[in-house]
């Protein structure tokens, strides 16, 4: 199924303040645009380093720009497409901080 990214603008806004990651985020968006996923494990076929979070969260963590940035997205597999919601974007250090508080399962900054 095709992937409907919600909200691409969030990524574009983030990149404005984090220019070194711009091309990596653009490559990620392009990969999502052409992705064809039928189940969560397919996400990892497209993005080898993606981590599917447990605890029934339906969330995935993407490593961006050589693991300099992390992005948490929530996914929902519908009947005709996959909805991928951007929940949080930050540096690797910022991601470690939210993990220390167990917030990776619930954070919704956007």
Image (cartoon, rainbow, N blue to C red):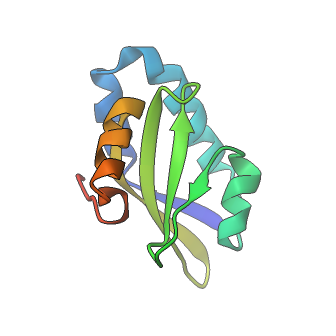
The quarter holding residue 31 reads top right
Quadrant in the rendering for residue 81: bottom right
Residue furthest toward the left? 109
Going 72% across and 46% down the picture, which residue do you hit? Answer: 48
Q: Residue at coordinates 68% horizontally, 50% vertically from top-left? A: 34
* x, y percent for residue 75: 49, 68
Compared to residue 77, the image places residue 100 above or below, namely above
In the picture, measured across the screen, residue 85 lies left or right of residue 28, that is: left
Place of residue 97 in the rendered image (x, y in percent of width and height, measured from the top left): 30, 41
The residue at the point 69 percent across, 73 percent down is: 39
The tally of labels here is 0
Looking at this rendering, what residue extends furthest in the top direction?
20
Q: Image check: 23 left or right of 48?
A: left
- In the image, residue 21 sits, relative to residue 51, either above or below, namely above
- Which residue is most to the right? 45
Who's the residue at 28% across and 33% down the image?
Answer: 13
Which quarter of the figure is the N terminus placed in? bottom right
Task: Specify whether residue 53 is in view.
Answer: yes
Indicate left or right for 106 with 71 as reference.
Answer: left
- Whether residue 1 is visible, yes or no, is no
**Residue 53 or 43: which is nearer the viewer?**
53
In this view, the residue in front, 18 or 97, is 97
Residue 71 or 85: which is nearer the viewer? 71
Q: Position of residue 2 (x, y in %)?
A: 64, 64
Q: Residue furthest bottom?
A: 79
């Amino acid at each position: 199924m095709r992937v409907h990214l919600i909200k691409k603008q969030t990524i574009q806004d983030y990149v404005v303040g984090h220019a070194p990651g711009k091309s990596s985020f653009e490559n990620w968006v392009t990969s999502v645009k052409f992705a064809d996923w039928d189940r969560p494990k397919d996400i990892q076929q497209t993005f080898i380093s993606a981590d599917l979070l447990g605890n029934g969260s339906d969330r995935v963590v993407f490593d961006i720009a050589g693991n300099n940035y992390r992005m948490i997205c929530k996914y929902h597999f519908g009947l005709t497409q996959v909805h991928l919601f951007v929940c949080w974007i930050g540096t690797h250090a910022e991601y470690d901080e939210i993990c220390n508080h167990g917030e990776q399962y619930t954070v919704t900054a956007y």
